[in-house]
Amino acid sequence: MTISAELSDRVALVTGGAGGIGAACAVGLAEAGAHVVVTDLDGTAASGVAARIVESGGSASGVMMDVSDSDSVREAVAGTLAVHGRLDIAVNNAGLNIARTPLAELDDQGWHAMHAVNLHGVFFCMREEIRAMRSDGGSIVNIGSMLSTVGYPDAAAYIAAKHAVLGLTRSAAVDYAEVGVRVNLIAPGHVRTSLGPVGMTSEREREVAQAYPLNRVADPSEVADLVVYLASDRARNMTGACLVTDGGYTAR
């Protein structure tokens, strides 16, 4: 790992950091010089990602956090402040996969489970992160979806949650711009992770890629590159933005 100084002396927190996009974001932020607090419902896996970052020359620690539990979120952010004295960057990545169920067939449990993580979890995290940042400013990056902006068949619960996260992003961006807290959203299409299509074989990936004008599925590192940019001073004039990285899917 080659460490740059772009985000040196900054502290970042990443949710859902045990794998996929979250792990890639943790690595990218560490490569840019930040100390990264890797959080996940699987605390052991989060600590494993942090250990690999440290072994590669970066700075990181792992913490168990359940984003759907406001007390767990509060404790994780408070712990970060207690150890590091600050929080400069937050990446709200934790999420549940799309639930393919027609709206009229969706039961209460499925609806609430999707929103507990994909919407309430983002709200709980943003609330604590903003409280931690509003004295000195900071950058929050929410990981939404290309489905934050368009509809999709048989995915009402997921679509509703992802649209709402875009609304939360824009509302918070307006509310906290004066205190230097920037809030932006990245909206990926399919990404090569465990949250993508079940059994993402090479053949399945080629099939999925055909839905995109660029005819490809993104790598998690491509999302991480955008996160590092939004976290940096290069994006100091960006807040309330929705950066779509979907291979042209929503352009049609």
Image (cartoon, rainbow, N blue to C red):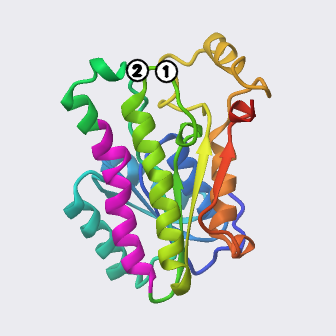
**235 magenta-colored:** no
- In the rendered view, does 99 fall on the left or right side of 29? left
Residue at image location 69% in from the left, 43% down from the top? 245
Q: What residue is shown at x 40% (from left), y 85% (from top)?
A: 85
> Where the N terminus falls, by quadrant?
bottom right
Residue at the (43%, 29%) spot, across then down: 98
- Please say whether residue 160 is visible from this viewpoint: yes
Which residue is disc 1 drawn over?
153
* Residue 187 drawn above or below residue 191: below
Q: Main secondary structure of the magenta part?
A: helix
Contact between marks 2 and 1 (CB within 8 A): the answer is: yes
Q: Which residues are magenta?
A: 114-134
Residue topped by disc 2: 100
> Residue 122 magenta-drawn?
yes
Label 2 – label 1 distance at C-alpha: 8 Å
Q: Quadrant of residue 39?
A: bottom left
Q: Residue at x 74, y 26 (%)?
A: 216
The amino acid sitting under disc 2 is Arg
Which quadrant, please, contains the C terminus? top right
Q: State the image coordinates of residue 186 (x, y, percent, origin top left).
A: 60, 51
Q: Quadrant of residue 34?
A: bottom right
Tell which tag, 2 or 1, sits nearer the viewer.
1
Q: Nearer the viewer, residue 124 or 252?
A: 252
Q: Earlier in the sequence, mark 2 or mark 1?
A: 2
- SS label for mark 2: loop
> Is residue 17 visible in this depiction of the protein?
no
Q: Is 221 situated above or below 128? A: above
